[in-house]
Image: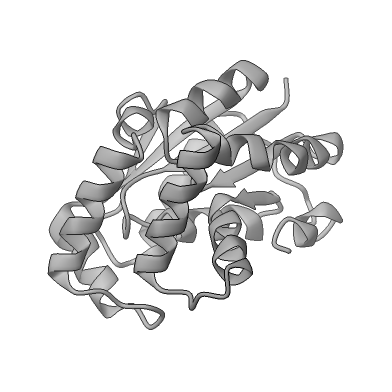
């Protein structure tokens, strides 16, 4: 059975770092955040945390809480035609999870976890669109209350703790989990022609 690894977690936990590491190992991925960014640009708005939040909420208000899964499904199907394992970065809502789980029984949820104080410090210091500590907390609350984000995190099949800023430790934990899941990576990480397309 083909597998989909969906990475979940709160902002600043290390989801994108995890997804990019898996991509570097030869796994193509679909990033739900691209849907938000494309819509922000389509509306002629600057890419800011507030605009992304507004657009995320609007997309789900218009298309339901599973809207991102519906929009991403064609790309997911395309990647699965050529790959045994793909990665989803940015699955948020419970409805997205239940929709994808029904469509793709091989879906595996991995929760990347870091303590709030660790996440907030990372978010406040990042080079692209840093946010204040107060904004970090408000973002957490908004995602939990308005995006039904807690469900997929709570029901995740596996959890990777990522309180350290040592990426080597994170990568080692990811490798260990891949071994437990008996996922065989491509001998040549560049052999998947779809991998680059997944980022476009």
Q: Is residue 44 above or below residue 183?
A: below
Relative horizontal placement of residue 95, taking residue 86 as reference (left or right): left
How many numbered discs, if any?
0
Residue 130 seen in the current view: yes
In front here: 82 or 152? 152
Relative horizontal placement of residue 80, taking residue 150 as reference (left or right): right
Q: Where is residue 196 shown, x and y percent of the image?
A: 77, 62
Q: What residue is drawn where x is 56% and y is 50%?
A: 32
Q: Where is residue 4 shown, x and y percent of the image?
A: 63, 33
Q: Is residue 82 above or below residue 40?
A: above
For the C terminus, the image quarter is bottom right
Q: Where is residue 45 shown, x and y percent of the image?
A: 51, 75
Q: What residue is drawn where x is 76% and y is 47%?
A: 186
Residue 192 seen in the current view: no
Q: Is residue 66 above or below residue 128?
A: above
Quadrant of the rendered structure where residue 79 is?
Answer: top right
In front here: 66 or 162? 66
């Amino acid at each position: 059975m083909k597998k989909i690894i969906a990475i979940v977690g709160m902002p600043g936990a290390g989801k994108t770092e995890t997804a990019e590491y898996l991509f570097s190992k030869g796994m193509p991925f679909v990033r739900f955040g691209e849907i938000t960014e494309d819509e922000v640009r389509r509306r002629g708005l600057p890419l800011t945390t507030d605009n992304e939040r507004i657009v995320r909420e609007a997309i789900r208000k218009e298309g339901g809480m599973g809207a991102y899964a519906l929009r991403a499904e064609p790309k997911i199907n395309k990647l699965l035609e050529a790959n045994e394992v793909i990665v989803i970065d940015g699955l948020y809502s419970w409805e997205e999870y239940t929709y994808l789980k029904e469509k793709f029984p091989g879906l595996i949820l991995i929760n990347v976890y870091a303590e709030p104080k660790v996440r907030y410090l990372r978010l406040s210091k990042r080079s692209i669109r840093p946010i204040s500590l107060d904004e970090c907390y408000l973002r957490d609350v908004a995602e939990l209350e308005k995006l039904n984000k807690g469900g997929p995190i709570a029901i995740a099949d596996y959890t990777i703790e990522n309180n350290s800023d040592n990426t080597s430790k994170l990568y080692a934990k990811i490798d260990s989990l891949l071994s437990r899941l008996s996922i065989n990576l491509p001998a040549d990480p560049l052999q998947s022609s779809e991998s680059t397309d997944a980022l476009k």
